[in-house]
């Protein structure tokens, strides 16, 4: 199988730096991190319900932080109740941190799910034999059915001992969180996740053939000394040294970010896609730009333009970090077979995304509907925020 060359680029200082994921010379992701700011996303906190918001059964929760939590409980909750919640989204508008009582505890191979007692295997693990092996092995995980487990993609072909050892560690963490949560004061942090940079590096599937290139020598030193950094990643770190070139120039990062800030993106061979972001959803329109042929070959031409749009759409969704509901208006196709082939093509391209992307199919109006898990802020908002 063809191996994609991956490079992680890191530019900035400990206070604020940016990490880009480059796959086969194409920038596919771009994120902002800090070694000095506290890690908030993923923290499990003892909160206290303050009041109900304008949305039914949604509440503001005191977290003893710079913003309150916004909890869509889905059921009545008395004021003063002190739930254990997990921060799953940074503040947006007036709603503060988005929190949930259905917290999870992630590991490298596993995710412990206290509020779902089932066992799930990552959809990216498609081998039936490997799925069965992991499900059978999950019976030996601790919890006696009181908690559930997700076998992550990283569990593929991992040995049982490593997975079970991590399961015991995660279950011990869960027990400590629950026990401490009984008497902990409001605002107490019951669990802190690993630094998001480490999660990012670990989830990109780096191998010994890949590299992590840092522009600043002091930042490089600090990164190599990070707590919880997997030892196998340390040799991949390198200091950028390309003479007169800056890291951004050498890897064409700035030009890729400039392109990702434009509303219209050209397609190879003609045509374009137009991306409009609204508060409720993302709308992507595919235009032929006059490149579709006329006559008997028109349907083939339309399908070809739509097919060329699929990888560009998924690349832009990933780079721009678009999430939530996404609607795609492809050029109308008359043949049902073309519609099905396009759906499968989108599913294949979406598998390259580290975030969970669900292709829901076509709406009654013939629009393709998909959703992408929301994590961190979109690229446009990140670049617009000077902090």
Image (spheres, helix red, strand yellow):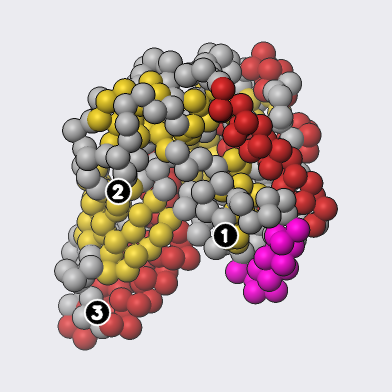
Kind of element beneath mark 3: helix
Q: Which residue is mark 1?
A: 118
Residue sitting at x 29%, y 61%: 369
Q: Nearer the viewer, mark 1 or mark 2?
A: 1
Name the spot of residue 141 as percent of width and height, x first. Answer: 72, 54
Mark 3 and mark 2 residues within 8 Å of each other at the beta carbon = no
Residue 58 visible in rendering: yes
Q: Quadrant of the N terminus?
A: bottom right
Q: Position of residue 338 (x, y in %)?
A: 32, 79
- The earlier-in-sequence mark between 3 and 1 is 1
Task: Decide: is 258 above or below 274.
Answer: above
Q: Is residue 128 magenta?
A: yes
CA gap, disc 3 to disc 2?
23 Å
Residue identified by numbered label 3: 299
* Nearer to us in this view, 72 or 21: 72
* Count of numbered labels shown in the rendering: 3
Side of 286 where 44 appears, left or right: right
Q: Nearer the viewer, residue 92 or 362?
A: 92
Q: Residues within 10 Å of mark 1 (few under 14, many from 20)?
A: few
Measure the alpha-carbon separation of dots 3 and 1. Answer: 46 Å
Please, what secondary structure does the residue beneath circle 2 have?
strand
| Quadrant into which the C terminus falls | top left
Image quadrant where residue 380 sits = top left
Residue 212 seen in the figure? no
In the image, residue 186 sits, relative to residue 166, either above or below, namely above
Q: Which residues are magenta?
A: 126-140
Circle nearer the N terminus (1, 2): 1
């Amino acid at each position: 199988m063809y191996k994609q060359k991956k490079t992680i680029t890191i530019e900035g200082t400990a206070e604020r730096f940016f990490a880009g994921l480059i796959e086969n010379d194409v920038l596919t992701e771009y994120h902002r991190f800090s070694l000095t700011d506290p890690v908030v996303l993923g923290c499990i906190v003892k909160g206290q319900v303050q009041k109900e918001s304008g949305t039914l059964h949604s509440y503001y929760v005191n977290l003893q932080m710079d913003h309150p939590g916004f909890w869509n409980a889905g059921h009545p909750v008395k004021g003063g109740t002190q739930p254990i919640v997990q921060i799953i989204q940074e503040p947006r508008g007036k709603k503060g941190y988005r929190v949930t009582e259905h917290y999870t505890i992630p590991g490298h191979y596993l995710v412990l799910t206290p509020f779902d007692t089932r066992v799930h295997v990552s959809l990216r693990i498609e081998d039936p034999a490997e799925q069965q092996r992991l499900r059978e092995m999950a019976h030996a995980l601790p919890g006696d059915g009181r908690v559930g487990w997700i076998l992550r993609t990283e569990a593929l072909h991992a040995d049982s001992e490593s997975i079970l050892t991590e399961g015991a560690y995660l279950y011990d963490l869960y027990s400590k969180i629950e026990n401490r949560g009984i008497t902990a004061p409001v605002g107490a942090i019951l669990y802190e996740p690993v630094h998001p940079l480490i999660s990012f590096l670990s989830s990109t599937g780096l191998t010994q053939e890949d590299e992590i290139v840092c522009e600043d020598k002091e930042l490089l030193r600090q990164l190599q000394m990070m707590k919880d950094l997997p030892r196998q990643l340390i040799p991949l770190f390198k200091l950028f040294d390309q003479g007169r070139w800056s890291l951004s120039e050498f890897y064409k990062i700035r030009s890729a970010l400039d392109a990702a800030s434009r509303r219209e993106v050209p397609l190879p061979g003609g045509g374009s896609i137009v991306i409009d972001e609204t508060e409720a959803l993302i709308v992507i329109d595919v235009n032929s730009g006059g490149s579709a042929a006329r006559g008997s070959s028109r349907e083939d031409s339309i399908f070809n333009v739509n097919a060329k749009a699929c990888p560009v759409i998924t690349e832009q969704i990933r780079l721009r970090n678009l999430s939530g509901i996404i609607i795609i208006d492809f050029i109308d196709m008359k043949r049902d077979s073309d519609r099905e082939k396009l759906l499968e093509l989108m599913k294949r391209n979406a598998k390259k995304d580290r975030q969970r992307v669900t292709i829901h199919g076509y709406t009654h109006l013939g629009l393709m509907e998909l959703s992408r898990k929301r994590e961190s802020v979109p690229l446009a908002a990140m670049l617009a925020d000077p902090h």
